[in-house]
Amino acid sequence: MADNTKKRRLSNDVIGQLQDDLKQSPLNVNTWDTLIDKVIAKDKHEQVIQVFEDCLVYFSYLGYFWNRYATYLLERLEFDKTKEIFNRCLPKVANVELWRSYIRYVRRTNSIITGGEEARRLIIKSFEISLENIGMDYYSDVLYDDYIEFLNEWQPINPNERNHRNDLLRGLYRTLIKLPIKDLERYWTDYTNFENEANPNKQISRKLVNEISGEYMNTRIKLSDLVNKIKGIPKEDRYLMNNESDFSKVGSLSSVIAWSEWERTNPFNLEKNTVKKRVNLSFQKSLQLYPFIPKLWYNYFTYLMDQQQDPSAEATNGESNQAQQTQELIVTVKQAISLNPTSFILTTLLSDLLQSDGKDVDTIKKVYLDLIEALQKYYNTDQMEDSIVNRSITEAYILLMNMLKSFKDGRSEIRKVFSQARKFEKLTYHCYVQNAYLEYYTFNDVKVAKKIFDLAFKKFNDNISFLNYYLNFVISIKDFSQAKVVYETFIKSNQDSLDREKLFKVYQSFMQFESQFGDPISLRNLEKRLSNHFGLDSLYLAMINRLSPFCSPSNLLELEPPFNSVKQIDEKQGSLDSILSMPVSASTSIEDPTNRPKNGPKKQKIDDNLVIKDDIYNLLRILPKRTFFKDVPILNEKLVEVLTNLNL
């Protein structure tokens, strides 16, 4: 339908075309950015506001769009609406340019010319608030420069004002040189120059500089460590990933993960609250660069939950604040899922949070149903392989059923979900198996579990992996007659279609089953069938496997045939231990007796590099034993080096 609408649009209706694109791909950041440019250029104010609001539904964490929004309103002198924007996003969104825009707003609405000292006081306070929240950012130097410039523009009219301004500058510089931020050395130079100019008495200026020079040197060392950690991380305050499938710029992903982990170790020996701020900043900046990486969101959420469970935090915050933090976390996880709608790990995390918050079953079910709906959008598209989509949708239903078992009416809810899942035509066998296991292990209903397996066998009677689960189940409940029926039905249905190796594994498993739970007559008949179909050698191999009572019949279905022919067994001297320990070869196969080569297997060529030659052996034999040396161990590496360089 969207495609037809797009066809009807005029070629010059760029805004309409972009809107159509966003209906199909609402997570395309570049398209939103372009649409904002176009509507601003058209100067349609109401449309601009609507586009910004629609965009922030998806990208409320992204300071880049908040800053564009606030700047647009500020340029139109809509100060009240600009204030509302800052109230919505600050201090939650970590973005240097956004805080700079906030300062511009405060200065525009508080003119020193008309407001005097009160206006200056408010501007200074806004700078201090901004630096408290974002001043630890490595790239916050531009904000410090703005503050220094503002203070230097102040022309004191009396000594008290001059002293007050100098105290503010001195405090700012002294704070700066303790922070590992960009251009630290420049700030140190500026500070020394400031003290020399502010103090006619050079002894006082030298004393003040010397007081803090040691801290400056320590900060320089810390700064070098930080630079090494973030050198692979882009400076950009906007975004790197264009959409959920854009992985062209994830080269620094490992760096941002390592950066957050490093900050958590408190490498700067800071107080606890400052460490929390730095760690939060690292996570938030990482998410602004890579919003479509669920692992980053998950790492951030686990950190936040760890902080909530911190005993000191519990004692300080109290139960009411803890509940508020949980609600805020739920909102943030939902935001993450809106950007990563097919993420299993974020869906499970949200489900756990909602359960701990006491939400009802329908609310939590919707979390998984939304995941399934998001996955189904990929069905019959070229964005993801069908097999991956089918397995993913199946796994989502399994997660939902597992979650429901803990609720009061969990069994009836599970059955409803299973009934719904079966309507998906490409549902894999895993959902049937899990549902049967829930009926058997959780609700102790073997009859229903068996019916589910029987139902699945009608649909997956050619799937050897499902056969393995089915056999494990019927053997575990001692329904040996049904196990035999399953074997026979599978062989009969797949005799001509299954490849020889897989069919041999089924026969091999069947023989193991008959040897443990069947009767001798049935076993002999099965041996004849195996010999007729695969030849005498295959019968010999199957008999070998019968010698181990610890190998489950169904587990044999997961094994590769361990050898090609009887002669390979004979070459290994025929011992049981050597046979069972033989490595599985990728080229192993069951040979068709009609196509066996006449000359038998070729002897394996031995690599000369793996053979210890006589001259080396004789040299090693005459070396003195280690016991002849007292407290002087032989250095094996040196010995190897000597022997390697010998020219014998």
Image: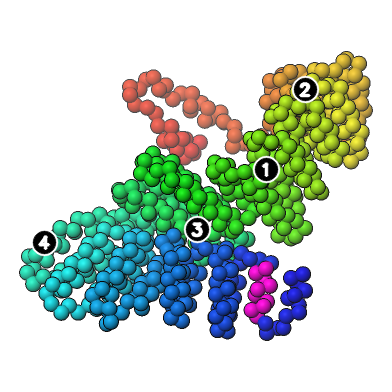
Quick one: SS at disc 2? Answer: loop
Q: Amino acid at mark 3?
A: Leu
Q: Earlier in the sequence, mark 3 or mark 1?
A: 3
Mark identifier at residue 287: 3
The residue shown at (9%, 65%) is: 204
Q: Which residues are magenta?
A: 14-23
Front: mark 4 or 3: 3
Residue at the spot of label 2: 477
**How far apart are labels 1 and 2 at the CA level?**
27 Å
- x and y percentages locating residue 505 in the rendered image: 81, 31
Is 503 on the left or on the right of 390, as rendered? Answer: right
Q: Earlier in the sequence, mark 4 or mark 2?
A: 4
* Residue 554 higher or lower than 6, as above or below: above
- Front residue of 382 and 374: 374
Q: Amino acid at mark 1?
A: Leu
Q: Amino acid at mark 2?
A: Ile
Magenta span has 16? yes
Mark identifier at residue 400: 1
Q: Earlier in the sequence, mark 1 or mark 2?
A: 1
Residue at the spot of label 4: 207
**How far apart are labels 4 and 1 at the CA level?**
68 Å
Q: Amino acid at mark 4?
A: Lys
Quick one: SS at disc 1? Answer: helix
Q: Residues within 10 Å of mark 1 (few under 14, many from 20)?
A: many
**How far apart are labels 2 and 3 at the CA level?**
50 Å
**Does the magenta stretch mainly form a helix, a strand or a loop?**
helix
